[in-house]
Image: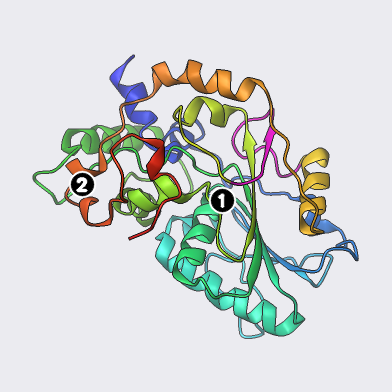
Amino acid sequence: MPIVVVLALAIPLTAQALFEPRRQAAPFTPPIFDRLLPERVPYAVILLAGHNSAYDGRPATDPNVERFSYVGLGAGGHPLPYGPRATHRSLTSSSHLLALQVEAVHRRTGRPIALVAQSEGVMVARTYLRDLPDSPVRALAMFSPLVRTGRTYYPPPDASTGWGLATGWVLRALFHVTTIGSAAPSTPDEPFIRSLLDEAPFYRYQTLCPVQGVRVIAFLPTVTAAEAPPGQLIHIPVVEVSAFHGKIIDRADATDDLTDFLAGEDVNRRRREFGLLQRLGAAWHAPALAIELNPVWRPTAPPGSPFTPSRFCGPVR
């Protein structure tokens, strides 16, 4: 396998930037934004878009639905418009903004909160729920979560030693060439990507796990089967959809399943080919770096032997 392909698969957003470098903004068009919530849905809903998305500030049709803003709230407590560059911020800073917005929406509506997130938005939501376990959030729907993140590492550009030193510089060269002309060029060192690298043990082992006190579901495109390592157990309800990354949330069938989930129904739809694709894709995976080998990760390594299913959904340090 060519080394550049291995490097491009090091983290999912790398491949996205390489193959779609000039897109002005990643599309995010969930139908729930443009219609009224059914009466059977008890939540106020915050929609979190993904990497390189944008928001024009337009309010949702239902006052109980709101877009998350990567630049925060305005003076009136409404989410501010943002451009693609705003999504490059660290997951911790995005989580802080989400905390403010969750509290504002909860106070305004008096309802428990449901987070409906896609791609990077999933990682923001997971970070928020990790850091604020007693929040008003009672439901989380994850669309196209980054299931392969946290399996590799390269140090910051000012480092002279560390795992993945050469990998980092090859990626920086690739990004420099492929993002020429982009309005919001991504880099391998932008704060969002560094968040995934530096906090890899959490995102590697906890993304597809239950959250205490929160109903959780994942909508997984079948392309995820080729990315997810065999043996990665999924401990939450799943809807598996024949689609590419980021291409589920605007589908009518996914909207129906999302609405049923938000209304309290049990939704769980598996595809038989998912496991087969997982095993077939394993041969093309870049080798994962053992948590204990990287001194940056070692302090937060979960209990259990390296590369075993026992680490998934275990205790978080």
- Is the stretch drawn in magenta largely helix, strand or loop? loop
- Looking at the rendered structure, the secondary structure element under dot 2 is loop
Quadrant assignment for the C terminus: bottom left
Amino acid type, callout 1: Gly
Q: Residues within 10 Å of mark 2 (few under 14, many from 20)?
A: many
- Asked whether residue 248 is drawn in magenta, I would say yes
Query: Within 10 Å of the Cα at label 1, are there few (<14), some (14-19), or many (20+) other Cα atoms?
Result: many
Q: Residue 28: percent from the left, percent from the top? A: 67, 49
Quarter residue 6 falls in: top left
Q: Which residue is mark 2?
A: 155
Q: Is residue 196 magenta?
A: no
Q: Is residue 180 visible?
A: no
- 155 and 310: which is toward the camera: 310
Residue kind at label 2, given as amino acid type: Pro
Report helix, strand or loop for mark 1: loop
Relative to 82, is 234 above or below? Answer: above
Quarter occupied by residue 106? bottom right
Question: What residue is at 73 percent from the left and 83 percent from the top?
Answer: 108
Numbered mark located on residue 50 in the image? 1
Q: Start and end of the magenta stretch? A: 236-250
The residue at 78%/71% (across/down) is 64
User: Residue at the left extreme?
Assistant: 160
Inter-mark Cα distance, 1 to 2 = 24 Å
Asked whether the viewer can see residue 89, the reply is: yes
